[in-house]
Every structure is written in C-alpha cells, then in structure tokens.
Amino acid sequence: MEQIPGLAFERAAWEQGHRLIVGIDEAGRGAWAGPVVAAAVVLPSVDDSLLARLSGVRDSKLLSAAQRERCYGEIMMVARAVGVGSSAADEIDKVGIVPATRAAMLQAVDQLCIAPDFFLIDALTLPVDRPQRGLIKGDRHCLSIAAASIIAKVTRDRWMVAQSAAWPAFGMARNKGYGTPEHRRALDLHGPTAIHRYSYAPVRLAVEARHG
C-alpha cells in the first residue's frame, strides 16, 4: 500500500501551541560526488485543504523527476517559508556525512524568512533550542518533511545537472553523483573530480588504484 504523508505530527505540535512548524530533510547523503543538500519547509496550516493542495507530495524517492518538479512548484506556491542549505564534498570529507548533513540543515533553517518554533526532522535531531522531533522515515509519514525532501532533491539534482558538463564522462546529469556502473567505470578510467567525496570508499579505492 502506498504511504501517503499526512499532518498527524504537525497537528500534534499545533495542539501544543506551536504555529511555525518546520519540516527538514536532505538529499545526497549516499552519493559519491556533489554536496549534501537540505531543505526546510514551513507549511501554512494543518487543515485538510492543505492535504488536498499538496496531494501529490510524497517522499522524493517515490516520485519521478517530472513529478518532483511539479510538486516543487506546488510547494513553493503553498509554503509559508522555504530555506535551502548545503555542505560541499570537501566539507563532507573533512567532518563526515552526518555532521555535514546537520550543518546543511541548520543553514536551511537560517535561510527561512521566519523563525520556526517546532522542528520535524527526518532521522536526525539538531542542536537547536527549540522543541524538535526526529522521525525515522519521516518523509514517508510527515507532509512537512516530505515537502522538504522534494525541495532538497530537486535543488540538488539541478546543481548536479549544471555541473555535469564539466565532466561528461561521469554521466552526472543522469546519476546525480550516485554509484552507478557508469559512474564506477568513469572513476576507474579518469579518477575522481573536484566534486567527488574522497572519504567515500569507492572514490578512495579509485585514487589508490591510480597511484599504486
């Protein structure tokens, strides 16, 4: 059965008196190249009309590229506030993927035009002095987090497509930096690029193979 994200977690926070509830998610944690991108989305209400207006919103991984693009536009029209942040590949190599992801999420919150008073976060918690709840598979169950997953994914995909012209052999417009057979072959043939994550095993092994 298809998992349709709802507003149960937002309504619970609303009942506690919170009105600026932000959903936060990321895209790109598992990729071999490119940044991890996070998005923060504050939806305007917790009523059923919002569910109807965003009826196509799902975990971004469950949608096609065309569906994500359509939902992106709908979310941007409906949301009260949207923020985006990112951590580049060299930052991921320096601090690790989880700290880099948290940093991107905090950047996304900082980019909001309003200050949220309750945080709903996919999988993680953040060092903030506001009430929060980390939800495992939050993008499957929580509309605010699902909306953030789409904003993060579309933003990151657009960036990867723009970068792909610099390294056409890697097919990054297609694989978005993830570990496909095409990507692995290009690593073996050409070595990593400036936007690869050298701390990730497939990239590190490719470097070691080229340098003996």
Image (cartoon, rainbow, N blue to C red):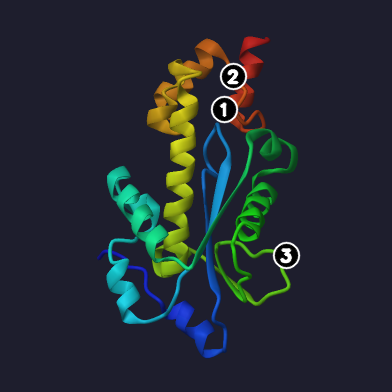
**Gap in angstroms between the C-alphas marked 3 and 2:** 36 Å
In this view, the residue in front, 141 or 37, is 37
Crowd around label 2: few <14 · some 14–19 · many ≥20 (10 Å) = many
Q: Earlier in the sequence, mark 3 or mark 2?
A: 3
Report the amino acid beneath label 2: Ala
Instruction: Say which quarter of the image contains residue 117.
Output: bottom right
In this view, the residue in front, 30 or 194, is 194
Disc 2 secondary structure class:
helix
Q: Are marks 2 and 1 in contact (CB under 8 Å)?
A: yes
**Residue 93, how many percent across, how many down?**
69, 35
**Residue 125, how many percent across, how many down?**
64, 65
Q: As displayed, is residue 212 above or below residue 178?
A: above
* Residue carrying label 3: 127
* Residue carrying label 1: 202
**Gap in angstroms between the C-alphas marked 2 and 1:** 6 Å
Q: How many numbered dots are placed on residues in this image?
A: 3
**Residue 164, how many percent across, how many down?**
46, 24
Front disc: 1 or 3? 3
Q: Earlier in the sequence, mark 1 or mark 3?
A: 3
Q: Residue at horizontal 57%, vertical 27%?
A: 202
- Residue 179 visible from this viewpoint: no
Residue 206 numbered mark, or none: 2
Q: Quadrant of the N terminus?
A: bottom left
Disc 1 secondary structure class:
helix
